[in-house]
Image: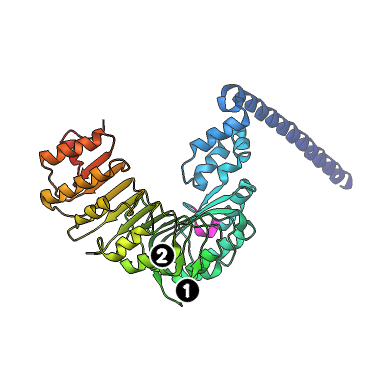
Amino acid sequence: MFSSVHTLRRRVNSLVDAIERQKDVLRNLERQCSDAQSELNALLDPMARLPIEIASDILLQAIPTRPTWDSLLIFLRVCRAWSNLAVATPFLWSTITDSGIPQAQFATVLEKWLSLARGLPLSLILRNAHPSTFPDTLQTLDAHTPRIQSMDLSPLHDEDLRLMTHTFDGLTSLTIYRSRIPSDLCVELLRRAPNLVELSFVEVQFHAASMPRHLTHPTLQHLHFRRPDTYYYSDTAIIQFLTLPALQSLFLSRSDITEEELLDFLARSAPPLRQLHVRLQEDDVCSEAIVASLRLVPELTHLEVIHPDSEYDYSTFDLWAHDPYLLPALRNLTIADFYYHGLEGYRRVLDFLAKRRASLRSLQLIVPGEVLDDATAAALRVFQDEGMDIHVDTGKEDLFSMFGMGDD
């Protein structure tokens, strides 16, 4: 009995050893097969034959502007060569977004994403921020805060801003989207981003938790209370707590800022403003405060005025035409949402164009339901033939196209 048990054990052990040897043989064969397949792929795949720098550039061109985790994982699943190339291209992973990732898994995915981006500057797009998981996200980002160059956050809550206590020295661009946040906490966030250059608020409302401490931000160059490519407006209340001496473009898309508040802001900031989009209240456009505001920005080259729900005062063109110290650098002018004033209004427009023909490059008038007479159209054609870009739009079509004056 004992001899039979001993013999069977030896036989089992011998079979186990034989199985392991066969597994080693199988693993070796699989490795050889994989290596041969990689060599075959290298011969057949043009990407595999390119220098890594060029192949990496091609990968970067293939990704969307805002890549998702799933869209990037595709490169890791094609084959070993593509996976190695993707891992060796940290720029591929430098834009991080939570799109399509369940909030409960995002912190784990974020750690992997950060490691693949290595030490590169980061663009962070969080469009599904949730109070229950935002603290975990901030904790994961803690050691990487100096690398964050751009942030796009939505929606933000009061508690989220209270948790964002880091100093964002590397942050140059910040967009806050679809949020209702306290003015004081937002100003403090800007204070902790001393090198911020671009700031956008899209569908943001401010409320007063406590009075914000006034902030002079020395590097902010672009402040938009709406992205130029959208129609979503934002509250502008925070502007009364800011002084921006480096500001070059200002996009005010709502009429809740008064003419006096705009004048005060420009007076204390004294910015080298180049672009201004402003939505005025009725009767503001020729007011002393608005004219005084425009005198404070002599370097302005692009001006867009939205003047809703009232008749536009064409005498503004008289002022701009005959005052050489008002907007002397103006190159591009757009005036939108005003109503028809007949031939007298267009006479003033033509006089303005004649006075500014040496410097003005473009004029766009957006006039609901407008009609151009032949004489005015012919006069405008002269300016366009001289190289000035002129459009008179009804909101549905460019009237110059109707007169054969569209761009060739």
Which residue is nearer to you in this view: 382 or 57?
Answer: 382
Name the residue at 17% across, 59% down. 311
The quarter of the picture where residue 360 lies is top left
Q: Is residue 103 magenta?
A: yes
Q: Residue at x 84, y 46 (%)?
A: 5
Left or right: 231 as drawn, with respect to 196: left
**Which residue is under mark 1?**
212
Name the residue carrying label 2: 267
* Residue at the (55%, 34%) spot, across then down: 57
Front residue of 362/163: it is 362
Could you say which is closer to the camera, residue 359 or residue 243?
359
Residue extending furthest toward the bottom: 210
- Residue 220 is inside the magenta segment: no
Q: Position of residue 188 (x, y in %)?
A: 52, 68
Tags 2 and 1 touching, CB below 8 Å: no
The image position of residue 133, as x and y in percent, is: 53, 64
Report whether residue 212 is seen: yes
* Amino acid type of the residue tagged 1 in the rendering: Pro
Q: Give the extent of the magenta segment.
A: 101-106
Instruction: Judge whether 38 appears above or below 125 on screen.
Output: above
Mark 2 / mark 1, whichever is N-terminal? 1
* Quarter residue 82 falls in: top right
Amino acid on which disc 2 is placed: Ala
Measuring from the top left, give residue 138's x and y in whole percent.
Answer: 57, 62
